[in-house]
Image: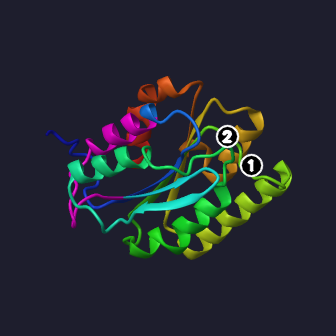
């Protein structure tokens, strides 16, 4: 396997994956991303949280130290039950903050949010969900000011795109029209994370 030598070989990447719709292209995207790095305990590490109606801590940054194990576990995320019609972004952000990032290495950690919708929950207005999401991001940034947050939006409407810009710096937001377009931004996302 050839790795890009310009990439920092000691990064931690935490993925927050919206599970409620198209999975195949998301998993292909994450697995191709993993292939760009030399994975190891003292190299690049990955963790994952999935979210829809429920939130799941899929695996920690310290659970797997080789690319094949990480890709296997990315694949298994989408075979589990727990999908739903809601997008519980605030709780996913809180789980990353209170659990996954505890095992991160200072100043080398990035969080990647992949979602196809604005945060939504039963009995919560869109406005209150946006406020809860912004609050969760503020807490994450207070606790871990060195963490870079990247957002990948799929088929997002204007309000969703605006929220992603509040979650991530404008240069760290990537949008595609459809799940099948994720592969077209892989190099852009990888380059942004590895500057």
Residue at the image position 67 percent from the left and 60 percent from the top: 90
Kindly tell me whether residue 194 is visible in this rendering: no
Residue 19 is at least partly visible in this image: yes
All told, the count of numbered labels is 2
Reply yes or no: does residue 39 show up in magenta: yes
| Rendered residue at 19%/42% (across/down) | 3
Q: Nearer the viewer, residue 153 or 59?
A: 59
Q: Which residue is mark 1?
A: 120
Q: Residue at x 83, y 55 (%)?
A: 124
Q: Secondary structure at mark 2?
A: loop
Query: Residue 10 location in percent, x, y?
Result: 28, 61
111 inside magenta stretch: no
Q: CA distance from mark 2 to mark 1?
A: 8 Å
Is 120 positioned to the left or the right of 174 in the image? right
Q: Which residues are magenta?
A: 26-46
- Dot 2: few (<14), some (14–19), or many (≥20) neighbours within 10 Å? many
Percent of width and height locating residue 144: 53, 72
Q: Residue at x 65, y 54 (%)?
A: 89
- Which of 176/116 is in front? 116
Q: Which residue is mark 2?
A: 117
Relative placement, left or right, of 24 versus 142 is left
């Amino acid at each position: 396997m050839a790795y890009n030598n310009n990439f920092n070989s000691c990064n931690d990447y935490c993925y927050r994956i919206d599970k409620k719709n198209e999975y195949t292209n998301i998993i292909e995207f994450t697995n191709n991303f993993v292939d760009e790095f030399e994975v190891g305990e003292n190299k690049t590490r990955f963790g994952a949280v999935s979210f829809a109606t429920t939130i799941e801590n899929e695996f920690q940054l310290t659970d797997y130290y080789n690319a094949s194990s990480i890709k296997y576990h990315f694949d298994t995320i989408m075979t589990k039950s727990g999908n739903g019609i809601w997008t519980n972004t605030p709780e996913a952000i809180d789980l990353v903050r209170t659990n996954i990032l505890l095992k991160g290495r200072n100043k080398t950690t990035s969080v990647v949010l992949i979602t196809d919708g604005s945060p939504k929950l039963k009995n919560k207005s869109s406005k209150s969900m946006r406020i809860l999401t912004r609050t969760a991001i503020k807490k994450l940034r207070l606790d871990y000011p060195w963490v870079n947050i990247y957002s990948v939006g799929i088929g997002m409407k204007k309000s969703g795109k605006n929220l992603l810009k509040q979650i991530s710096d404008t240069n760290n937001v990537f949008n595609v029209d459809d799940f099948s377009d994720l592969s077209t931004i892989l190099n852009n996302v990888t380059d942004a994370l590895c500057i």
